[in-house]
Image: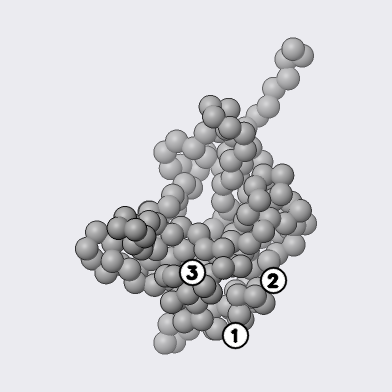
Amino acid sequence: MNLQPSWNVKPTQPAPIVRSGVDGPVVQIMHWGFQFEIGGRTVPGFNARCETVASTWPFSRALGKRPCLVPATGFYEWTGSGTSRTPHFIYLRDQPVMFMAGLWDRRLIRGAETPCFTLLTTAANSFMRRLHSRMPILLSAQDGLLWLSGQSAVEALTPLSAGRMAEHPVAPLKGDHAGLVAPVVQSDFGF
């Protein structure tokens, strides 16, 4: 598999995930977002709340059967409003890759059965609270393997501690290049 780096994966785009295979973990490219019909219109399900995932279709169909991990070097969260919104790059202080808990399934997308995934989210920890009220469930490698093997229920997932997380503001996200995760240099001209 020839994985190309990406610094700006957006919902509806393909991304690598790790799922269980016959001989152990398998990396597969999948579409980000379950799609389902509500009131005659198609709705994408990019994220699933861990508190309601068991009772929310179509996520409940994959729960307990199709866990996955979404590896990433970090993710973005925005603060502010209107034209003064600022993206922040969130990453781990102590390791280069994080693992976000997710679910995968096969859904009809534009008439074709497509492998897709959704991220599991939880209430923000003390680090994330100043940026957003929700966050992806970030797992250690050990907890990630338990999640993949089906040995860990969604209620038992223990997110990484806030002390392991870091962030910095970045320039507006345009394109897909390594410069997107570079810290924005703040200047103070005294006025």
Q: Residue furthest front?
A: 39
What residue is rendered at 62% in x and 56% in y? 135
- Ranked by sequence position, the earlier of labels 2 and 1 is 1
Compared with 164, 89 (above or below) is above
- Residue under pointer 1: 151
Is there CB contact under 8 Å for labels 1 and 3? no
Expressed as whole percent of the image width and height from the top left, the position of residue 27 reads 43, 71
**Cα distance, mark 3 to mark 2?**
21 Å
Label of residue 56 in the image:
3
What residue is rendered at 69% in x and 22% in y? 187
Q: Within the image, what quadrant is residue 168 found in?
A: top right
Expressed as whole percent of the image width and height from the top left, the position of residue 184 reads 62, 32
Q: Secondary structure at mark 2?
A: loop
Q: Secondary structure at mark 3?
A: loop
Q: Quadrant of the N terminus?
A: bottom left
- Residue under pointer 2: 158
Residue 103 visible: no
Q: Within the image, what quadrant is residue 165 found in?
A: bottom right
Q: How many residues crowd around disc 2 within 10 Å: few (fewer than 14), some, or many (20 or more)?
A: some
**Cα distance, mark 2 to mark 1?**
13 Å
The amino acid marked with disc number 2 is Thr
